[in-house]
Image: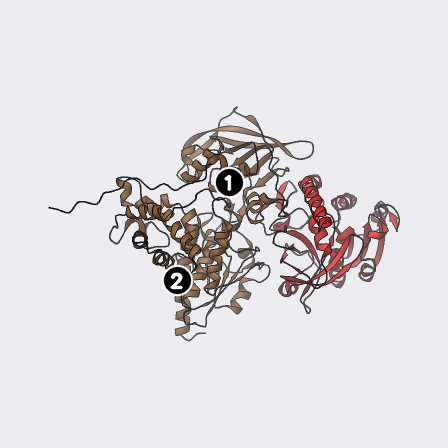
Amino acid sequence: MYKIVKKKRLTSQINLFEFSAVEVARKAKPGQFIIIRIDEKGERIPLTIAGAKPEKGTIIAACQEAGKTTKKLGKLREGDYIQDLVGPLGNPTEIKKFGTVLCVGGGVMIAPLYYHTKALREAGNRIIGVIGARTAEQLIYEEEMRQVCDELYVATDDGTKGYKDLEFLKDLLKERKIDRAIVLGPIITMKLISEFTRPYNIPTRVCLTPIMVDGMGMCGACRVTVGGETKFACAHGPEFDGHQVDFEGLMARLKMYTAQEKLAFVFYEKGERGS
Amino acid sequence: MSKPKPKIHKEVVPMPKQNPKERVHNFNEVALGYTVEQAVAEAERCLQCPAPSPCVKGCPVEIDIPAFIKLIKERKFKEAIKKIREKDNLPAVTGRVCPQEQQCQANCTMAKIGDPISIGRLERFVADWEREHGYDTPPKPKPTGKRVAIVGAGPAGLTAAADLVRLGHEVVVFEALHKPGGVLVYGIPEFRLPKKIVNAEADYIKKLGVKIKTNAMVGKLYTIKELLERFDAVFVGTGAGLPRFMRIPGENLCGIYSANEFLIRVNLMKAYTFPEYDTPIHVGEKVAVIGGGNVAMDAARCALRLKAKEVRIVYRRSRKEMPARAEEIENAEEEGVIFEFLTNPKRFIGNERGWVKAMECVRMRLGEPDASGRRRPIPIEGSEFTMDVDTVIIAIGGTPNPIIPQTTEGLEVTRHGTIVTDENGKTSIEGVYAGGDIVTGAATVISAMGAGKRAARAIHKYLMEKRNSGKS
């Protein structure tokens, strides 16, 4: 059992959790993920690590409520326990001095982006940060990101805060010399930024979050085509070259259980109302 | 007057099974097990061949088979299971999933004149008897003060752990998944090996004093080198649980599973109870399972139980070359699985939403025997045809788990990724032993248990020599 040491509601849909996991906290690095299971009947879901406090023995992850499992997790409180937590899984991102790094994050993935960005800044990089959300209310980690970025740009899909969508980045890329880009966010964002950086040959790393089961290379649920080859996001990634990833295939696979997820959610809501 | 000769019963006592028509609608165990009277009747058929008995020679863990059968005949069931447990730490499991027809029973003297003794069913009977009547735990041995880490709680690791703890060593098993059992919990389906039985066997091993730490992925959470700082020896039994794909176009379409994923969802995550359990599974109307081994049979039979209309085993060789156990092929056939022999997929065809809708196949013929001794399948040019499918399960084998080799400097591996050991499991690093599928490549539960046993013996010897030479 793993204790929820701290929980903070960041938006109406996103929660930040600090789980007690002493050994995981000691080993975790930016780019890696954990897999959790809430209870005996629960599914295994991956969460990208958004920070670790080895001295406190905790690991930080953000979760956006979407279906049954994430809603259930959102209902848990500080002091509650989850059944399972395993990690750190996947390969860490490369942290060294690249020069100027463009760090782009969307939605719930801004939380782990902060973990990356902080490490990249400490390694001596100049950071251009870009964070975005659907709407202003769903934007997270703006203050935290400001502290680790040399410049920070904010965008929303509906224009309620900062730039309206990410089109402004086209001009920015034209004007500036950027040595590396790292993108954590929805598939559509990762795909868009990869297209923006392609003409400039900027090495662009994307952190994928496909469906996973074991997260240890055993099942292949998370397979994705990268440069024409099949890769497992859990074992070979989760970070890949954004210019090589087949985002369409990834998007289709992510929707594989939409019908079942809806069904589970309906049953769950019904049960919650009944009790 | 000479004494009348005892009557020899040539025919095996059949084991009751669930009716195929009924069992395809549930995940309950297919084989129902012997009653007391059936077990005693079967035990009475045993000729009690003197040592070295041919059956014992066929057993990878050297169970004294005639002795335990004699005890069943005498209705001393407690003594019978004790006899088995001297050598076998997972009798309820091996009684169900061992390929006895290729091992102990293949050598049985009775086979020369009739049916061999059903050793597996008798083993299962006493193991189940024990579970129902309560376990006796052997007395705790004198502690040696030595500590052993076991990596992976599958058949090899659990066997090594149980043997070592009985010798007085402190044993901690590190398991990456959330439940111990390895392939016994994620791979073999409920209807062949009920999970409550695996849990009971794992609990017994814990009762012996073994600590099992789940959610601990060695290689990520700690390296082997770090374990060697805290333990006197390490056994690696991480298995061959990585799925192999076919490397043909369309393989990443939705609706295409590795057998591992399909079985992990169904068995470990209990997707067959969805939405009671949260993990979903997709099974369409027309399912194709690629491969001819036990895993392919398991996947096909799960798909039937998950309400597929048609389930086909697509295998590139003929029935004769199928590596699956005869009993499992028979069970699959009884349940309505269709077999497409000498057929191989060439590519998968998707619909506009990225889901598989068909599979282009080619017919095969058999050529000369290859390295495996089986005749090599050769595509027949121009024989291509399309098979409509909406779910595909690829069951063409697994590869060794690379995580330990990748994170352990100085550990010698073959070009196939298996760990190099001597016959007792000793690796290229002092104090590090390995066994099971990570050494042999994908094989059977019992051969992994045999390897765990041999390694435990070698580790014990190593630790005692180290202690006596005063090195520690």
Residue to which mark 1 is pinned: B396
Left or right: where B241 falls relative to A275: left
Please rate how many residues cluster around mark 2, counting C-alpha atoms within 10 Å: few if below 14, some from 14 to 19, many from 20.
some
Q: Position of residue B340 (x, y in %)?
A: 49, 30
Look at label 2 and name its amino acid.
Arg
Disc number at residue A10?
none
What colour is chain B? brown
Are dots 2 and 1 in contact, CB under 8 Å? no
How many numbered circles are shown?
Answer: 2
Q: Read off the chain for label 1.
A: B
Q: CA distance from mark 2 to mark 1?
A: 34 Å
Q: Does the rendering let one see residue B297?
A: yes
Q: Which residue is mark 2?
A: B457
Amino acid beneath label 1: Ile
Q: Is residue B231 above or below residue B302?
A: below
State the hue of chain A. Answer: red
